[in-house]
Image: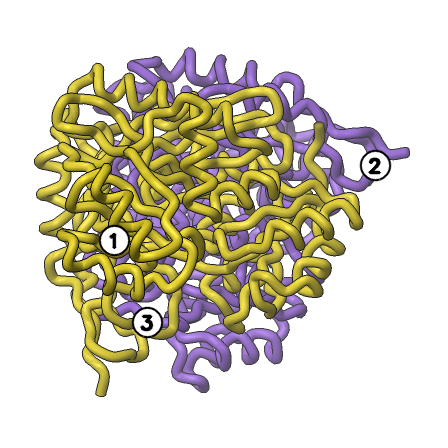
Chain colours: A purple, B yellow
């Protein structure tokens, strides 16, 4: 194992904020990134060696990445597992996590089946292919429930709540494709664990509480406001999930904590995840550096938490689309122990993820007060409205 | 004050490791860097938006930086203050720190005179322009002493010790140009303070102990192994030094602690400095982010130390020049709380700065044990010898 210059090159399908933060983490390790993204000058572009402009599932684009890189990975589930697998084999370029894992995760039904088969606690679910099948399933699971498109959803897109039998027809029409329905989990809290598979090692980052609104992540805090035994159970479930995953890398493992203290698996992302952004300042190794260590076969780093840490997303608050101009930044920039992360997106629209704030505790601040403080610091932030 | 995309662009004269670490720090703030460096694909290149290839003191190069940037700064004292000043004025591009400060600092004699005039404690010194003048000066200052070229020295180059009257002729011949001689300070420790001037604010990072060998920085530890009153005095001297500096930015302020607890100023660098690399992990704001905040007029960040922190440079250990291949990296990469920084230099030679390690304390480790631990982690590191 050695460091050279130029160093190891990693090709990344996707050049959004995750690619950008991977780029920021790569440089100290002497790793260079080439990202692919359909948007020219994507958010990652200024932080990486080069960008190939091309669709996430375009074979020639992935081929170019592979020819220029020592390893392939992806920061978006819209990557195509068949193309990644074929190109990886053809060019003898390792792909991490394994395309088979991406294939399983892309299909929400296949993901749940695989996890349930492995004994991991998941909400009750059924495959449904018609309004009639949905109605039958809900006779069994009960109302309300969540109807989910099997493929392509993120940040709540592709998920439709079904409150009563009257909603069945419209909900099924809204999905308009292969679907599954899942019992509605009346959770106490949502939790997340960033897990990591190295060549011969597995680690978990400390459990994080995630706070969503309209199915979009708004805030995180670690440690969560949950009893120690619940955190330990969350960690155990995450380790069980890692057993099912194939290939190296970081996995975002989203969980429900039920009112009676059980842990149910919600969803998995085979990549760094919004619920782990706090690790940049909050842990000795960030999820981004950890992912790169794992993908390139370096030893995994410590996942220990340096201090209690909260984060808050900076989301678009404008109607329509506008050039991104975030005002009110003096307050967060002047707040001690607060870090600002800007993703460099040219345009803002309602609820688009534009950046985030991370606040680490000075003394022994509890999670409640950390969340209150990061909210206060974010209060003045607002985007200039479209002209 | 707002964040936009594309964001503020900073032109940096110099694209070495300081430019690279500035690039790593710029991205989260949405700041883009363009560096200039005579070496194509300089260390900073993969971490910044673009590199202009050109000498540090080439006017057309600086002109191009200015035309593409909102602010100009420099990470190497070989930048030319006259060109920076002229280009800055012509293109209406602010230059930070002020070229006049660079001019003063470049001339070691002018630097010492300015500081002495401002009442800052400095070692006794004299301007010398001939062997005779050197002999006269040393009749007064005593032997041993340090003869220094007025311009162009760094990492000990341009400094010649004069042990006795027999050395005078050879020492003067070795400098071969305008020189100054300085009393030899029999210091207890060397200390450094990274100071920072913002638009309407000044801050100091916590005092650091610096450990040199053959005038090249090897290790740092903060807090230093010095009494609290000595640290406080060092901080006061650093604040006095900042009063003399013009223009925004971070300044590396190198100090001697004498056996009787006095603080004497050694040298100033008008830029981020090796003695402040530990702030990346050790403080809430790194010296690199702080420099960019200062240069672009953003509020300064907290300089508080997160934990006691030690760093150790990774220096070339080969004879001759070779392609850089650092072996033994498993140990530092597997050491908890240790971060590796690789500078991406293609070639290694004896004592060239190739990277550094930073170790932050887990509990209440003292500075002595932190230094011992970072040395242990660096022990297996060695460069592959030239073929």
Q: Name the residue under label 3.
A: A4
Residue at image coords 42%, 45%: B108
Closer-to-camera residue (A286/A237): A286
Closer-to-camera residue (A193/A73): A73
Percent from the top left, x then y, of residue B214? 19, 55
Closer-to-camera residue (A23/B181): B181
Closer-to-camera residue (A29/A5): A5
Q: Mark 1 points at which residue?
A: B216
Identify the disc placed on residue B157. none
**Real-space CA distance between mark 1 and mark 2, rounded to the nearest whole angstrom:** 57 Å
Q: In this view, does A308 lie above or below A91?
A: above
- Front tag of 1 and 2: 1
Q: Is residue B203 above or below residue B85?
A: above
Q: Do tags 3 and 1 sit on the same chain?
A: no
Percent from the top left, x then y, of residue B371? 13, 41
**Real-space CA distance between mark 3 and mark 1, rounded to the nearest whole angstrom:** 23 Å
Residue at image coords 56%, 74%: A62
Where the C terminus of chain B falls, by quadrant? bottom left
Q: Do tags 1 and 2 sit on the same chain?
A: no
Where the N terminus of chain B falls, by quadrant? top right
Disc 3 residue crowd, few under 14, some 14–19, many 20+, Cα 10 Å: many
Q: In this view, does A190 lie above or below B136?
A: above
* SS state under label 1: strand
Disc 1 residue crowd, few under 14, some 14–19, many 20+, Cα 10 Å: some
Percent from the top left, x then y, of residue A231? 27, 28
Residue at image coords 70%, 50%: B69
Taking the image as shown, residue B16 lies to the left or right of residue A235, namely right
Q: Mark 2 points at which residue?
A: A320
Q: In this view, does B121 lie above or below B337?
A: above
Taking the image as shown, residue A46 lies to the left or right of residue A24, namely right
Q: Which chain carries label 3?
A: A
């Amino acid at each position: 194992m050695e460091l050279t210059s130029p160093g190891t090159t990693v090709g990344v399908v996707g050049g959004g904020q995750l690619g950008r933060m991977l780029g920021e983490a790569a440089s100290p390790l002497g790793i260079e990134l080439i990202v692919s993204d359909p948007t020219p000058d994507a958010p990652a572009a200024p932080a990486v060696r080069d960008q190939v402009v091309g669709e996430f599932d375009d074979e020639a684009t992935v081929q170019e990445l592979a020819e220029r890189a020592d390893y392939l990975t992806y920061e978006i589930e819209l990557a195509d597992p068949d193309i990644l697998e074929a190109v990886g084999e053809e060019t003898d370029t390792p792909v991490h996590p394994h395309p088979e894992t991406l294939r399983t995760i892309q299909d929400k039904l296949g993901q749940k089946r695989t996890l349930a088969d492995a004994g991991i606690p998941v909400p009750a679910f059924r495959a449904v292919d018609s309004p009639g099948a949905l109605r039958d399933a809900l006779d069994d699971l009960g109302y309300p429930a969540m109807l989910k498109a099997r493929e392509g959803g993120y940040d709540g897109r592709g998920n439709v709540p079904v409150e009563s039998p009257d909603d069945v027809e419209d909900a099924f029409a809204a999905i308009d494709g292969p679907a599954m329905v899942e019992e509605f989990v009346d959770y106490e809290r949502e939790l997340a664990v960033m897990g990591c598979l190295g060549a011969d090692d597995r680690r978990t980052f400390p459990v994080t509480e995630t706070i969503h609104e309209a199915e979009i992540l708004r805030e995180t805090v670690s440690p969560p406001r949950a009893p120690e035994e619940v955190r330990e159970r969350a960690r155990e479930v995450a380790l069980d999930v890692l057993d099912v995953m194939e290939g190296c890398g970081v996995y975002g493992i989203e969980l429900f904590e039920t009112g009676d203290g059980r842990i149910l698996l919600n969803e998995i992302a085979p990549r760094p995840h919004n619920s782990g952004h706090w690790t940049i300042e909050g842990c000795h190794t960030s999820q981004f550096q950890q992912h790169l260590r794992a993908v390139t076969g370096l030893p995994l780093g410590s996942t220990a938490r340096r201090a209690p840490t909260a984060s808050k997303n900076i989301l678009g608050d404008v109607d329509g689309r506008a050039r991104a101009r975030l005002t009110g930044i003096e307050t967060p920039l002047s707040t001690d122990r607060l870090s600002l992360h800007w993703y460099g997106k040219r345009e803002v629209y309602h609820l688009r993820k534009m950046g985030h704030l991370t606040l680490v505790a000075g003394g022994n601040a509890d999670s409640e007060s950390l969340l209150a403080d990061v909210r206060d610091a974010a209060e003045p932030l607002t985007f200039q409205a479209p002209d």
